[in-house]
Image: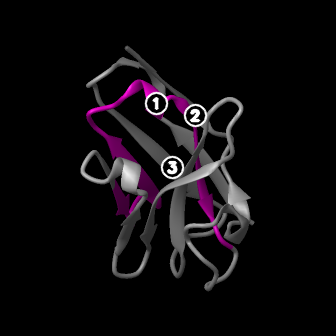
Amino acid sequence: QVQLVESGGGLVQAGGSLRLSCAASGRTFSRYHVGWFRQAPGKEREFVAAITWVGGSTYYADFVKGRFTISRDSAKNTVYLQMNSLKPEDTAVYYCAAPSASGGSLYSSGSYVYWGQGTQVTVSS
């Protein structure tokens, strides 16, 4: 069993920055990947970014490339999402997630089993 806890959300003006954290307990991410997703009111949950725990390969949705950076700290068992140049359309609840096994598309929310409670990010114009 894995417990994921996000933190770092808040209210920021357009153009500002936030750093989200996803801390894991119960099991390390030692073999798989970790993803960030977001869900805005009335919209479906969408992929934002993912990182493989071994090798640290990163993957991003087109709409965040160049603005968001995903990273990990193995010693702290924590994944981060640095969000710069935030836009009002980035407003959403952000979730981190982890799979229970390897395989499956890291872009698809259906591939993930463990989810955090989410953290609200609000970007004002």
Q: Position of residue 113 (x, y in %)?
A: 73, 65
Q: Could you tell me how far apart the alpha carbons at marks 3 and 1 are, in whole angstroms?
A: 22 Å
**For mark 1, does the 10 Å Cα neighbourhood hold few (<14), some (14 to 19), or many (20 or more) residues?**
few
Q: Position of residue 72 (x, y in %)?
A: 37, 61
Q: Position of residue 36 (x, y in %)?
A: 52, 53
Task: Name the residue carrying label 3.
Answer: 22
- Say whether disc 1 or disc 2 marks the residue closer to the N-terminus: 1
For residue 89, the mark is 1
Where are the magenta residues, as a range? 70-99
| Residue 73 is covered by the magenta coloring | yes
- Say whether disc 2 or disc 3 marks the residue closer to the N-terminus: 3
| Residue 47 is covered by the magenta coloring | no
SS at badge 2 = strand
- Say whether disc 3 or disc 1 marks the residue closer to the N-terminus: 3
Q: In the image, what residue type sits under mark 3? A: Cys
* Closer to the camera in the image, 85 or 17: 85
SS at badge 3 = strand
Q: In the image, what residue type sits under mark 2? A: Thr
* Closer to the camera in the image, 93 or 32: 93
Task: Name the residue carrying label 2.
Answer: 119
Looking at the rendered image, the quarter that the N terminus falls into is bottom right
Q: In the image, is 70 to the left or to the right of 93?
A: left
The residue shown at (59%, 76%) is 105
Q: In the image, what residue type sits under mark 1? A: Glu
